[in-house]
Image (tube, grey):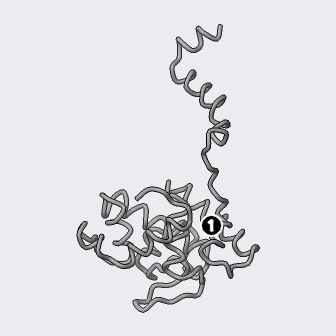
Amino acid sequence: MTRALLVGTPLAAAAILLAVYLPECEAWGEEADAPTAAVIQTLSPRVSDERADRLAVWFDESADRYLLDVRLLVALAYRESGFRAKAIGPTGAIGIMQTKPGGAALRWAPRGCRDQYRPRCSIATGAGYLAALRDEICPGSWWRWIASYRYSRCLSEAEARRDRGARRARELYRRAGGRAW
């Protein structure tokens, strides 16, 4: 019967094999990713355990919603504000993810999120904006959409690779455990 199942439905067979062998990946030498709260405290050791746990829930929710690497989202938040909810940037961007009130805040904020000083709203809005850069506004290499996060336009590949903020985000992402890019 098992052979008939495996031969008859290739997707079911693949699902069974993954279910059986995937849990053994750690035994093969794969390292498990650090919990998001630990990643937050790696970048900013002064963040309390309680605050890191609270932020981690919101980062995980937003990363899952927009199919983003949570370590990248955390690295960008740290680069933008140092995880300070009341941060105000030189161009008027606010909150943890430094979104501009009225711009990204209105377009990419989830329903009910109008106050970008609220960490949950800021993280969700920043994640939505980053996903839009990746998928629609500035598709291409990571360099382009990560560098363009800080600007009101899509940077060229050459501009993006020269951007100090993008290089800093890459450094933070790697320190947070990110491997690609």
Residue 173: % across, % down: 50, 66
Q: Is residue 93 above or below residue 174?
A: below
Residue at 57% x, 80% y is: 115
Q: Which residue is mark 1?
A: 39
Residue 138: % across, % down: 30, 63
Residue at 64% x, 63% y is: 36
Residue 168: % across, % down: 43, 75
Label 1: state its secondary structure.
Answer: helix
Q: Is residue 141 above or below residue 26?
A: below
Picture quadrant of residue 124? bottom right
Residue at 28% x, 70% y is: 154
| Kind of residue at badge 1 | Val
Picture quadrant of residue 86? bottom right
- Tell me how many marks there are: 1
- Closer to the camera in the image, 2 or 115: 2
Left or right: where does residue 178 sit relative to residue 21?
left
Q: Quadrant of the C terminus?
A: bottom left
Left or right: where does residue 153 sit relative to residue 8?
left
Left or right: where does residue 148 sit relative to residue 17?
left
Q: Quadrant of the N terminus?
A: top right
Residue at 54% x, 68% y is: 175
Dot 1, crowdedness within 10 Å: few (<14), some or many (≥20)?
many
- Closer to the camera in the image, 57 or 118: 57
